[in-house]
Image (cartoon, rainbow, N blue to C red):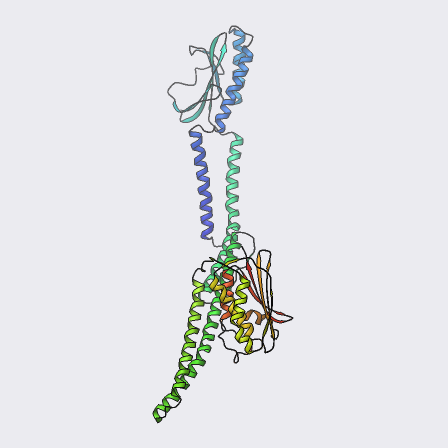
Amino acid sequence: MKVSRLYLKILGTFILVQFLAMLAMFALVHYDKIRPPFARHAENRTVAIKRLLRQELAHETALTPSLRKDLTSMLGIFARAFQGEAWLTDQNGNVIVSSFAEKIPLTGKETVEKETPTDDGDTFFLIKRHDRISVYMTGTIQFAGNPLTVHLLHNWEKRPEEKWLMRGLLLMSAISALLLVPGSRGITRPLNELTQSAQKVAIGDFSPRVKIRWKDELAVLGSAFNHMAESLEKIIRGGRELTANLSHELRSPLARIRFSQQIIQDRMESGKTEGVKDHLGRMAEEIDHMDALIDKIITLSKRDLQEPPLRKDVVDLGSMLKETMSRNQQLMTGKSISTAEHLAPLPGYRCHAADMQIVLDNILTNAVKYSPENSTIQVRARANGETVVLKVTNPYPPLSETELETVFLPFKRLGYEDEVEGNGLGLAFARKIVEEHGGSITASNEQDGFCMTVRLPLT
């Protein structure tokens, strides 16, 4: 099994954290912020022997031979318990009783590695003797009004429980290092899948998607990648469709211009100039049409790259609807189309007024263009809680679910394409503007025909 670099990084971090934790612990011990176990054990022994000595000396007034014998026996038992030595000295430093028969085991030439007072008034020493570290404790008790000093000395050796603790920590560290393997693979596997998918996207294949297995940060990353891939796929597909549709839209006027040019050229060569001015006028109209078309495409493209304009206007959408219908009155009169208005009072709506006018113009103009003669267009407006709802319905054959969504794509026109003037960009503009205002625009089939619904939030 190949060891991943991520695993090595996690393992290195784990080891570094353990090392820093041990370093911090040693620093705390060195600066007396915490007591190491062997120091606490030495303090506890000193406290215990002092308590026993006080009890033994409580009812005595002098160090009789019998008392010395009892104290010697006590110190011997106590010293053997921790495999060390214990003795008692008077205020002049003379040994009164001890657990040993020889001279004092300290020569005064030992190196003091550490000296620390305890909370009980005793003193803790770490000394070096015979090339070994020993623990030396001193404490004071009172006897017959005079101070006596208790001395405890033993080699520094780890207690069995401390050895087991260290072994346990080492075992836990080893197990943790092994458990990092599946843990790191759980991270590297989705990252490798994400890398492979990203590499495919980089060469133009937008089909790969990342499998979302858990609800964690990697799942968020995977969801973001899938969303990005879907968006890129739509953008690329839309760009290709836009190029194809644009080529189609420009090919027709260019063909008409070329045809008029050929007629003009033939007549100029034959010396007949009748009708040349009409053909020049048609060519100018076609050029203006292409110029307007290209201008709309550039404007639509810029909206995807620029920040939406500020919404600093407060308008009455009901009045805007009436004004828009009034501007279309001549076209409606020519087709004998009437309107049925159901406009409830609406609160003021904050928006970019010029953009919102584009939305209403496109919706109402399309309704008039695609409605048959002698028909009625339904116009409704109402406030629904924190949302304004606008509906424009005109008679039209039912569309499929795919067609209801396709009408918002650039250059997509359904039915009467050769009879109705237009370029298929109006509803694409309208959706973009409505979404910039935080709203939505949808198409649906209703009993009265084809319905456009705009929902705009008031907040």
- Tell which residue pokes out farthest to the right in this image: 447
Query: In the picture, residue 284 is in which quadrant?
Result: bottom left
Percent x, y of residue 287: 40, 78
Percent x, y of residue 125: 43, 23
Q: Residue at x 43, y 83 (%)?
A: 256
Q: Is residue 409 visible?
A: no
- When the figure is inspected, residue 446 is found, relative to residue 223, above or below; the finding is below
- When the figure is inspected, residue 373 is found, relative to residue 66, above or below; the finding is below
Q: Is residue 199 left or right of residue 343?
A: left
Percent x, y of residue 103: 43, 15
Query: In the picture, residue 394 is in which quadrant?
Result: bottom right
Q: Is residue 128 left or right of residue 212?
A: left
- When the figure is inspected, residue 76 is found, relative to residue 385, above or below; the finding is above
Q: Nearer the viewer, residue 436 or 324?
A: 324
Percent x, y of residue 106: 41, 18
Q: Is residue 168 left or right of residue 299?
A: right
Q: Residue at x 54, y 51 (%)?
A: 216
Q: Is residue 304 visible?
A: yes
Q: Nearer the viewer, residue 264 or 294?
A: 264
The mark total stands at 0
